[in-house]
Amino acid sequence: MASIQFSRAETCGNETAYLADVLAGGQFASHGPFSQRCTAWLNSAFGAPASLLTQSATAGLELATLLTGVGPGDEVVLPSFTFVGCANAIALRGATPVFADVDPQTLNLDPASVEAAITPATRAIMAVHYAGVPCAMDEINAVARRFGLWVIEDAAQAFLSQYRGRPAGTLGDLAVFSFHGTKNVTCGEGGALLVNRPELVDQADSAHRNGTDKTAFEGGQRAMYTWMGLGSSFAPSEISAAVLLAQLERARAITEQRRMLWERYHQAFAAAERAGRVRRPVVPDDTMHNGHLYYLLTPTEAARDNFIAGMRRAGIVTPFHYVPLHTAPGGRTYGRTADSGPLPRTEHVASRLVRLPLWRGVAEIQNRVIETGLDLLERF
Ligand SMILES: *Cc1c(COP(=O)(O)O)cnc(C)c1O
């Protein structure tokens, strides 16, 4: 039997035609017609004051930390249970990532743990919507307001997720999406930054274009363009934008298909959860997830490792996820926890989590994944 991959990038229709247009059209670099159409799609979906395409969510996070102005001596609070790019974006500015604990139900940043990590040096909170389930953003924003902090949303996994009727990505001052090959909507490597504060739009646009005033020049408001401030080459090529546009145009259908696969797993493991053999994801009633990721929490780390090994023997790839950043060499060098202590909930969760294959083609083989998984869980 062929092995079942954990993740797979899938086309959805117009990628080849749009790519052919780019290749025939003579503009391969950034800011061409496909980039403009992607940006228009994002503007109409999210209504942010500005939407900027980036070469990755990681690049978007780096642009976001640049825009907040954090630097040496400043601290940014973020979960330890997240992707390394979050912490790098802070450390690359010379600021200190301060790792907070997660809510054991959602595995998202716990507002109380954020508050406990705040010091006079804190400048920002980076909230990560794990598995496409939005964080408790009203509570996190309330903490931010009380202490005068920026809020950066890492919505890399949460494209088209919702929180209290509002889209993820519109809930913080700045937000990033990822269009990486493992994400719901993809162009291989890509991302976007939503700028939700109107007064940041000009600075964001300039930083996105190597810190220049090129947009004003292109609009005829300048005779030439030049270096104005800090920035980098954040924009993706038209080649990426062509693939991205094809996927954006199908994004709502992709999300629905993934939500159905997610739901099928959720039903299938309900009885095992009632029997105490596993814990399923918790999605708060006031959020809507996007079917990005289906995970299970086993009772122990040994059970998780046995599960992964058993699935691998059956040809099914079911990876664990983040190594908590506060325990990683980079995390110990560049960051710290609130009181330099452990983050017990993060460590407990990370050691027991396993992810199931979820891409649209899984529909045909999902029963095999479910039956093998249930069988393994019964044996622990
Ligand atoms: C995927 C991911 C990123 C990084 O996305 P890239 O586009 O690969 O840079 C950042 N944060 C989280 C939470 C992610 O899942």
Image (spheres, rainbow, N blue to C red):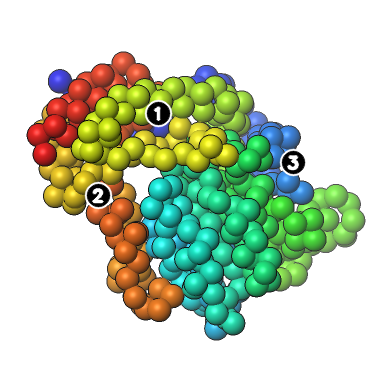
Q: Which amino acid, by three-letter code, is at mark 1?
A: Trp
Residue depicted at 18% across the width and 41% down the height: 308
Name the residue tied to disc 2: 352
Q: Distance between the residues labelled 3 and 2?
A: 39 Å
Residue 175 in the image: x percent, y percent?
A: 61, 52
Residue density around tag 2, few if under 14, some if 14–19, many if 20 or more, within 10 Å = many
Please tell me whether residue 374 is drawn above or below residue 134 in the rendered image: above
Q: Residues within 10 Å of mark 1 (few under 14, many from 20)?
A: many
Percent from the top left, x then y, of residue 267? Answer: 35, 24
* Visible residue check, residue 341: yes
Amino acid type of the residue tagged 3 in the rendering = Gly
The percent coordinates of residue 120 (x first, y second) are 59, 82
Q: Quadrant of the N terminus?
A: top left
Q: Name the residue under label 3.
A: 47
Q: Quadrant of residue 165?
A: top right
Q: Earlier in the sequence, mark 1 or mark 3?
A: 3
Where's the C terminus, which quadrant? top left
Residue most toward the top?
364
Query: Circle 3 — which element?
Result: loop
Mark pair 1, 3: CA separation:
28 Å
Labels 1 and 3 touching (C-beta < 8 A) = no
How many discs mark residues in the rendered view? Answer: 3
Label 2 amino acid? Answer: Arg
Residue underneath mark 1: 262
Looking at the image, which residue is at 90% across and 56% down? Answer: 221
Quadrant location of residue 150?
bottom right
User: Closer to the observer: label 1 or label 3?
Assistant: 1
Sequence-first disc among 3 and 2:
3
Position of 287 with respect to 88 (left or right) is right
